[in-house]
Image (cartoon, rainbow, N blue to C red):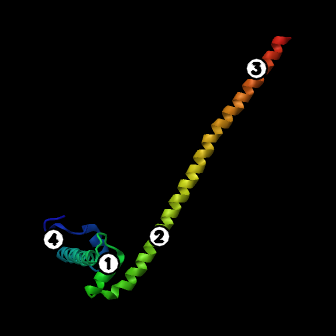
Amino acid sequence: MAEKVEDLSLPTAVMVRLVKDALPDGVNIAKEARAAISKAASVFVLYATTCANTIAVSAKRKTLTASDVFQALEEMEFEEFIPKLKEDLIAFKREQKGKKEAAAESKRRKSELQSSEDSAPEAKKQKTDDSNEDTKENDDSIDES
């Protein structure tokens, strides 16, 4: 864990992108304003995390859950954000489920393809063995003549 709060900050590129997306086109933001917003966002995240952790600890858990975060937002008096955050969480879970299912399907197809490739050489080998036996029989019949 960091020694000081100043050591903890969100990535500058992410913060700049968020700020630019929130502002109308053509609005510039001074370097000092970007730094102030970044620092405020970092403090907010730390405070929300601390509140959520307090809730988890009081429930005798070591893992923070989404409900801990929502409850922390209520305690911080940011309850107006909760409905939108819940919608976003549902969308995120749906997206993750879709990705997981797509990865499983891809893995299944790859496995099927691999197993069909593995069985093909054996069928070819068996065919070659059968051809060798036919040739051997033909060789035996030649010797008898």
Circle 2: element type: helix
Which residue occupies 20% across, 76% down? 43
Cα gap from disc 1 to disc 2, whole angstroms: 22 Å
The residue where tag 1 is placed is: 68
The three-letter amino acid code for the residue at tag 3 is Lys
Q: Nearer the viewer, residue 18 or 89?
A: 89
Image: 44 above or below 102? below
Cα gap from disc 4 to disc 1, whole angstroms: 22 Å
Circle 3/circle 2 CB separation < 8 Å: no
Mark with earlier residue (4, 2): 4
The residue where tag 4 is placed is: 5
- Whether residue 25 is visible here, answered yes or no, is no
Q: Splitting the image into 4 quarters, where does residue 62 fall? A: bottom left
The three-letter amino acid code for the residue at tag 4 is Val
Cα gap from disc 3 to disc 2, whole angstroms: 61 Å
Cα gap from disc 3 to disc 4, whole angstroms: 84 Å
Which residue occupies 76% across, 22% down? 135
Which numbered disc covers residue 136? 3
Which residue occupies 41% across, 76% down? 89
Q: Is residue 114 left or right of residue 131?
A: left
Mark with earlier residue (4, 1): 4
Q: Nearer the viewer, residue 87 or 31?
A: 87
Mark with earlier residue (1, 2): 1
